Amino acid sequence: MKRAVPLIALALVALAACSAHPRADVSIGELHRIADRFDRAQLTQNAAEMDRLMADDFILIGSDGTRQDKSQFIQGFTAPGMHFDFVTPTDRYFIPLGPDAGLVGGDAVLTGSDHGTPFRARIRFSDTFHRIDGVWRAVHAEATRVAEPAAT
C-alpha cells in the first residue's frame, strides 16, 4: 500500500499537468483569413486552391437541399460557361470551436452568368473549418437560398 500512494500521487500530478494548460480557441482573425481564402478560391474558380483548402471528405448541403462531395463542389464552381462576380459576404460571424476548428457564416448575394445568362441568388451560408495535420481545411458547408428583401 505504501508503494501505491506515490504512484497514485504521480498519476494525479501528470493528469493535472495535462489539463492545466488547454490550448486556446482559434482566433477570430485566423478564421477570417481562412474563410477569405476559401471564398476567393471559389469566386476566382481556382480549382487547385479549392482542392488544397478542402478536406477529401468535404460535404456541402446545397441551397436546394442536395448533398455534394468535394469533387462535385469544385466542378460546380469551375463548370465551363460559369462566371461569378466578386462578392463581399455581409452579416458575417465567426465561431471558434476549439484550437483546431471553427465555423464561419454570413449572407451573400451571388451574381454572375451561366453560359451568358445572368443570375442572382441571395444565400445564407456556413462553412466549417478544421485544422488537419497542421493545415486548415473546409470540412462542411451549407448554403440556404433566401428571398431578397422587398424594395421599398
Image (cartoon, helix red, strand yellow):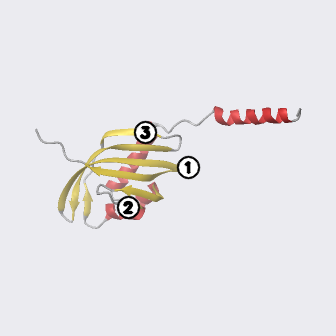
**The quadrant where residue 4 appears:** top right
Of 39 and 122, nearer the camera is 122
Question: Pointer 1 and pointer 2: residues touching (CB < 8 Å)?
Answer: no
Q: Secondary structure at mark 2?
A: strand
Instruction: Specify the amino acid type for callout 2.
Output: Gln
Q: Residues within 10 Å of mark 3 (few under 14, many from 20)?
A: some
Q: Amino acid at mark 3?
A: Ile
Q: CA distance from mark 3 to mark 1?
A: 19 Å
The residue indicated by pointer 1 is 134
**Sooner in the amino-acid sequence: mark 2 or mark 3:** 2
Determine whether 17 is above or below 46 in the image.
above
Labels 1, 2: front one: 2
**N-terminal of the two: label 1 or label 2?**
2
In the displayed structure, would residue 12 be above or below residue 122? above
Q: Marks 1 and 2, Cα distance to the nearest angstrom? A: 25 Å
Q: Which residue is mark 2?
A: 68
- State the SS at label 3: strand
In which quadrant of the rendered image does the N terminus lie? top right
Q: Position of residue 16 (x, y in %)?
A: 69, 33
Residue beneath disc 3: 95
41 to the left or right of 123: right
Amino acid on which the number 1 mark rests in the picture: Gly
